[in-house]
Amino acid sequence: MSSLTLSKRPGSLSQRRRLALAFRIVLALAMLVFALFPVVWIFSASINPSNSLVNQKLIPDNLTFSNYTNLLESRLFPYRTWLWNSFYISVITTVFGVIFTSMAAYAFSRFRFRGRRTLLQSILLIQVFPNFLNMVALFLILQQLGQYVPSLGLNTHGGLIMLYLGGILGVNTWLAKGYFDSIPRDLDEAATIDGATHWQTFWMVIMPLVRPILVVIGLLVFIGTYSEFVLARVMLTKVENYTLAVGLSLFIRDQYANRWGVFAAGALIGAIPIVLIFLALQKYLVGGLTAGSVKG
């Protein structure tokens, strides 16, 4: 009897493994469908000739790419200008945001100065309040600043970039500081003994080791800036200065039932830069966290 029970155990264990594998496959497929269905639905709307939300079908009767052509050739809605505005604003914000964040995180992580803890707590406390609570204050600041520096006033991309930089430094500084703290201080001391300055230690020793967290911060900043709507809608008033998110809202503000296909085409084209950047930085996001480790 015991031998019969033992002979059944391997089969039951193998069956459990097959059931677990089948459950994982079904769960993965369900999540894949859940993630891709909105993209497929938007793509279907972009090639639907009816250009209407009411007659939306998953598989349109007559496929056409006229919505893409009308979008890129439209004179009423400068879509290509909006796309370029969002792209270069996001790139500039990301570059300066990563530079300022890394410098601030290095200073808070490596230096000890009076008011350091209070300043860190103040930065975190300020980030608790959402941006729309200080929208009026930001509007008045840009209005007053524009009287002295026109390139940083209202309806300027420079002023919008300045607001974005002020909003991203707090949380990202805390995030980067935690990663900087994980880097052994022995490296700093060894570089100082070799005659390196603080800047040389920061740029040549520490920066290569914290590249993974900087890539993550840069990607988050780019995506957040690229898709931001509220600040850009309030601070920018001219159509040619709109970002992509603000410009696309014009398609669904009125008569959206007749512009649904064009809006879907614009949303898909606008997502291409984010997808390409994510694919380009994927090796840093997936395997970069294990790179740059310090060997004893």
Image (cartoon, helix red, strand yellow):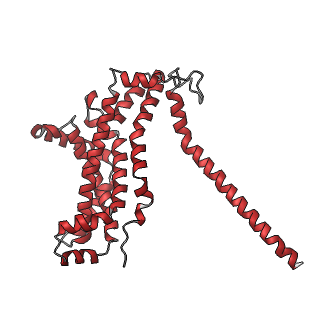
Q: Residue at x 57, y 44 (%)?
A: 34
Above or below, 46 against 134 in this view is above
Q: Residue at x 44, y 61 (%)?
A: 287
Above or below, 84 against 95 in this view is above
113 horizontally vs 164: left or right: left
Q: How many marks?
A: 0
270 horizontally vs 113: left or right: right
Image quadrant containing the N terminus: bottom right
Q: Residue at x 22, y 69 (%)?
A: 201
Q: Tell me if residue 107 can be seen.
A: no
Q: Quadrant of residue 72?
A: top left
Tell me residue 138's x, y (percent).
Answer: 23, 44
Tell me residue 110's x, y (percent).
Answer: 24, 71
Tell me residue 242's x, y (percent).
Answer: 29, 32
Tell me residue 119's x, y (percent).
Answer: 23, 64
Image quadrant containing the C terminus: bottom left
Q: Residue at x 50, y 22 (%)?
A: 51
Q: Nearer the viewer, residue 66 or 111?
A: 66
Q: Nearer the viewer, residue 115 or 285?
A: 285
Q: Quadrant of residue 35?
A: top right
Q: Tell me if residue 61 can be seen.
A: yes
Q: Nearer the viewer, residue 146 or 20?
A: 20
